[in-house]
């Protein structure tokens, strides 16, 4: 029931409701109409409902339709959107007034019935195709349907320590986030009169504070003279904690009730007698929901004063200049609908509630950021901050994406409650393992990661060769891995920009500076030195290693199996090694860094740990020479020959070229 704050319905009563039609002069109708005109929507709804149920004759159908319309408007005003949509359906049914389709669409929207709302907006737009409210509503319903169950990372929970069986709303955090001020209509407020608008008592400002263990304590009325029989709420406190701005509804000289901004000064632990904020004292208009910026330069507020864009607008006033005039925040912020409940974070960032921007229904909370051209960029905060119900009045813990807001979600009566929220840190990280070419972990290898955003992080591998580093989202990174006795390795990647936790895996394999390194997956045509296409990935990887280690000279060597003569194998392996060198030179590697040798079958492979893991029939350390292979069965002889047929590179020098 966001609209219940300080009789906020009264603020809007003369702005958007259809005028009460005359000619229905029954006793009950006159009573209901009087309640309605005074803005006592809760009382009026009860009276209209009784009257509606009594109108059963055929000739009373037009009157029943009119009563249903007024009942719907009352139910809408007190935030009971399900009841309001049902009443609008009856109003259309009995009166045939299709112009009410827009009202019905908005109530369906606020009740979370997005598909029905979209259909009804479209139906209305066939008659009034340029209506801005209908177009905005249709866009909001489309957005809600396309969003579905997708939510932002905000975590939202009821603030049980503060909520009562009545309404609590418009929270404000002070004292470094250790005090929470808010408006309440609980049964223990100072006034006795119940509002005809909401059926609840007028609001008071209460406060809860944290104890030494950080636990919120039972709320109590603020000390001093702020609260009265009138409706008080929407507190905002200066950064030094000495001045409170708040709203109060009151009547002067029997005139209609208006909402004004008041100031109370704090002395020791008590708030003093409030004084009217004279800079915004224009009896023709309403001023509500003050929010003082942390630097004390601006006061943001809600008003229906002339010069606005819609029903209520967000304005701000310079407090540090004499004779300053209120500034309307313009069409990027304000719409033909209602903008209200501003929360100033800085002179270039504030939050507000609106039903005039595309949203999820009712009031949604929006973020407004000042751009270089002086305009405001407005963004919906998404679910779960926003819902199909009224969501408004947000407050933040200083320098954190955490705090409280108010919402009527989940309350069939339309009452508001406080909710806490927080945006947990994204858990985006990169992890991997650094090994040598034999897939053995390298302990203490250095991993450095440099981001295009200017970040530069470094870590070392653990005993198992693993590493882990935190990342930011949507950043291009370059990674470099190195260790003593090994060549460096380089990789590049870009982290996702989605609002989700993510774990990236990047493994490094470092080439030895002292031992031969097998280049896996290099294949040649049978009995020839022609490189096969499937060798490209391995060869390109070797190019990358040499580019990363620009001062390294290497020897490329090819080895053959035991089959064939020694001279034949030597000639074939030499041509194959030369084919690899030719590929590297064509790829841009300086030929002065490269030599090649064909060893034929003169250097059989000795079984390493990796080979023993892959082929457990061979014991680590075994030399796969011809004498050993002859002792094997045919299947294992073929495996041994395959191991001996290999391409390797060995570091022969390290100097700049």
Image: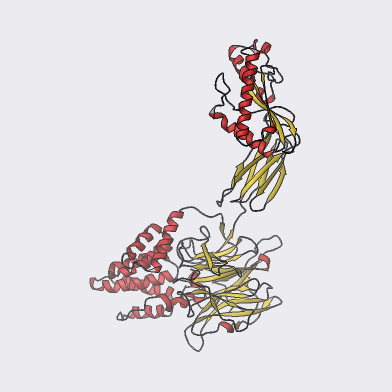
Direction from residue 366 to residue 573 in the image, left or right: right
Please report the residue visible at 30 percent of the width from the left and 72 percent of the height from the top.
64
Q: Which quadrant of the figure has residue 164?
A: bottom right
Residue 5 lies, with reference to residue 470, above or below; the image says: below
Residue 163 lies, with reference to residue 527, above or below; the image says: below
As drawn, the residue found furthest toward the bottom would be: 253
Mark yes or no: residue 469 visible.
yes
Front-most of residues 248 and 41: 248
> Residue 530 appears at what percent x and percent y?
56, 24
Q: Which quadrant of the figure has residue 209?
A: bottom right
As drawn, the residue found furthest toward the left would be: 59
Mark yes or no: residue 407 visible.
no
As drawn, the residue found furthest toward the front would be: 592
> Residue 290 appears at what percent x and percent y?
57, 75
> Residue 251 appears at what percent x and percent y?
51, 84
Front-most of residues 169 and 18: 18
Front-most of residues 242 and 546: 546
Direction from residue 269 to residue 156 in the image, left or right: left
Front-most of residues 340 and 604: 604
Quadrant into which the C terminus falls: top right
> Residue 549 appears at what percent x and percent y?
70, 38
Direction from residue 618 to residue 421 in the image, left or right: left
């Amino acid at each position: 029931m966001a609209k219940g704050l300080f009789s906020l319905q009264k603020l809007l009563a003369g702005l958007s409701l259809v005028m009460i039609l005359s000619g229905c002069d029954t006793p009950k109708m006159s009573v209901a109409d009087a309640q309605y005109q005074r803005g006592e929507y809760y009382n009026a709804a009860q009276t209209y409902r009784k009257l509606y149920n009594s109108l059963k004759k055929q000739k009373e159908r037009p009157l029943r339709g009119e009563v249903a319309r007024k009942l719907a408007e009352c139910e809408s005003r007190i935030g009971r959107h399900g009841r309001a949509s049902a009443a609008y359906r009856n109003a259309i049914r009995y009166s045939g007034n299709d112009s009410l389709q827009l009202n019905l669409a908005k109530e369906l929207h606020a009740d979370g019935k997005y598909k029905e709302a979209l259909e009804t907006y479209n139906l209305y737009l066939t008659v009034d195709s340029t209506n801005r409210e209908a177009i905005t509503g249709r866009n909001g319903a489309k957005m809600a349907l396309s969003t579905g169950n997708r939510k932002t990372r905000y975590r939202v929970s009821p603030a049980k320590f503060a909520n009562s069986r009545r309404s609590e709303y418009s929270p404000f955090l002070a004292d470094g986030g250790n005090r929470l001020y808010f408006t309440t209509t609980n049964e223990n407020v100072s006034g006795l009169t119940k509002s005809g608008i909401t059926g609840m008592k007028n609001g008071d400002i209460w406060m809860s504070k944290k104890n030494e263990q950080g636990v919120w304590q039972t709320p109590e009325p603020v000390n001093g003279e702020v609260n009265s029989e009138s409706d008080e709420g929407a507190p905002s406190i200066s950064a030094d904690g000495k001045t409170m701005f708040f709203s109060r509804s009151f009547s002067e000289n029997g005139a209609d009730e208006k909402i004004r901004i008041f100031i109370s000064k704090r002395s020791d632990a008590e708030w003093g007698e409030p004084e009217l904020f004279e800079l915004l004292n224009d009896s023709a208009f309403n001023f509500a929901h003050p929010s003082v910026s942390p630097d004390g330069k601006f006061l943001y507020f809600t008003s229906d004063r002339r010069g606005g864009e819609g029903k209520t607008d967000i304005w701000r006033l310079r407090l540090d200049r004499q004779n300053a005039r209120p500034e309307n925040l313009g069409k990027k912020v304000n719409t033909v609908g209602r903008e209200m409940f501003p929360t100033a974070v800085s002179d270039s960032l504030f939050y507000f509630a609106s039903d005039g921007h595309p949203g999820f229904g009712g009031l949604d909370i929006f973020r407004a950021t000042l751009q270089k051209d002086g305009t405001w960029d407005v963004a919906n905060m998404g679910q779960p901050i926003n819902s199909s119900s009224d969501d408004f009045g947000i407050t933040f813990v200083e320098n954190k994406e955490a705090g409280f807001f108010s919402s009527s979600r989940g309350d069939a009566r339309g009452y508001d409650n406080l909710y806490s929220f927080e945006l947990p840190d994204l858990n985006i990280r990169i992890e991997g393992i650094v090994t040598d070419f034999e897939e053995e972990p390298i302990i203490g290898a250095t991993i450095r990661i440099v981001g295009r955003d200017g970040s530069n992080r470094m870590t070392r591998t653990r005993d198992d060769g693993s590493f882990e580093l935190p990342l930011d989202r949507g950043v291009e990174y370059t990674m470099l891995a190195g260790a003593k006795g090994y060549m460096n390795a380089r990789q590049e990647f870009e982290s996702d920009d989605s609002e989700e936790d993510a774990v990236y895996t990047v493994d490094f394999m470092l080439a030895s500076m002292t031992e031969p390194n097998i280049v896996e997956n290099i294949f040649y045509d049978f009995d020839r030195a022609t490189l096969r296409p499937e060798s490209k990935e391995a060869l390109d990887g070797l190019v990358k290693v040499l580019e990363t280690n620009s001062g390294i000279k290497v020897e490329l060597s090819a080895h053959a199996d035991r089959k064939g003569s020694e001279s034949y194998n030597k000639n074939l392996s030499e041509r194959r090694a030369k084919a690899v060198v030719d590929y590297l030179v064509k790829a841009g590697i300086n030929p002065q860094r490269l030599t090649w040798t064909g060893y034929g079958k003169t250097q059989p492979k000795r079984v390493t740990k990796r080979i023993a893991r892959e082929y457990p029939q061979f014991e680590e350390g075994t030399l796969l020479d011809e004498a050993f292979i002859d002792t094997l069965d045919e299947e294992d002889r073929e495996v041994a020959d395959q191991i001996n047929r290999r391409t390797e590179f060995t570091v022969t020098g390290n100097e700049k070229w």
